[in-house]
Image: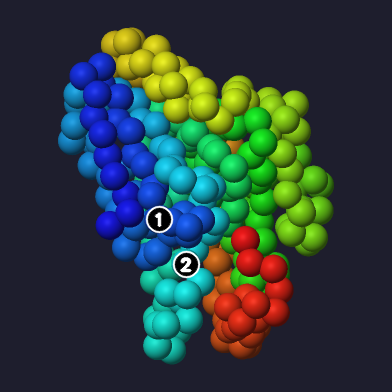
Amino acid sequence: MAIHTDTYDNGVLQVTMDNPPVNALNIEDTFEIASICDSIRHKPEISALVLTAKGKGFCAGVDIKELENTDNHEGILQVNEACYQAFRAVNECDVPVIAAVNDFCLGTGIGLVGCADIIIAASDSQFGLPEVDNGALGALTHLERLVPRQRARQMLYTCETAGAEELHGYGTIYKHVHLEELLATSLDLADRIASKQSLTIRAAKRSAIGIDTQDIRKSYRYEQGFTFQLNLAGEGQRARKEFLEGKREKE
């Protein structure tokens, strides 16, 4: 298991992704993120959650090697369900979720941070969706929560990334800091949130979800339908094979 948790006395839960070399999330770990976020419903002592990563990169996306080693279409079925549940759980977590992003945030990472309440990033962080290059779609729903719509579409079609400073300019990243300050800054903000009345903070989170004008569940499921279509057409397998054979640059 590459997902670790630390609970602090002030009511902050730290969830750390740790899957070298680039924090590509496998199916089990993606479901584990969903399980942790859902479990907070029954843990009134928790008032804030910090989602972060250890090592190189916040998240490089799904584990393509795992997908290719799964028979028939079972891999894509499990990956899609795991991502759906993880994104849903982060978005609907009973307490505010702070994403502390280092280095690169791609694919699945965009889904996670796009569902977080607050984002703090290392100043050199890059955000993007390499899905088109991977013969798949998904998480444009969440990218559009980070950058304006037309910029998001340009990033989708070209697989171009955007930096933390750009996102900070849009107001979607709360703060960008030196990498060495990232975790401390995120935990400090979480501590400020956790110092409030727990019942009120949880009510505030529910109200924030309730007034959201976008149905994230429905929107992301719609995108996933095209991933199934591309996979059935053989495009997904072709792109993944090229990636694993080194015919295009690996993240």
Q: Residues within 10 Å of mark 2 (few under 14, many from 20)?
A: some
**Residue type of the residue flagged with mark 1:** Asn
| N-term-proximal mark, 1 vs 2 | 1
Q: Nearer the viewer, mark 1 or mark 2?
A: 1
From the image, tell me which residue sits under label 2: 63
Indicate whether 172 appears above or below 30.
Answer: above
The disc at residue 19 is 1
Picture coordinates of residue 75, whole percent (x, y): 42, 77
Picture coordinates of residue 119, whole percent (x, y): 54, 31
How many discs mark residues in the rendered view? 2
Quadrant position of residue 70? bottom left
Residue name at image x 62 percent, y 61 percent: 251
Picture coordinates of residue 240, whole percent (x, y): 59, 78
Which secondary structure, mark 1? loop
Picture coordinates of residue 45, whole percent (x, y): 19, 24
The disc at residue 107 is none
Q: Nearer the viewer, residue 34 or 9?
A: 9
**Residue type of the residue flagged with mark 2:** Asp
Residue name at image x 42 percent, y 82 percent: 69
**Is 233 positioned to the left or the right of 211 in the image?**
right
The N terminus, quarter of image = bottom left
Q: Nearer the viewer, residue 13 or 210?
A: 13
Indicate whether 64 appears above or below 241.
Answer: above
Q: CA distance from mark 1 to mark 2?
A: 10 Å
Mark 1 vs 2: CB contact within 8 A: yes
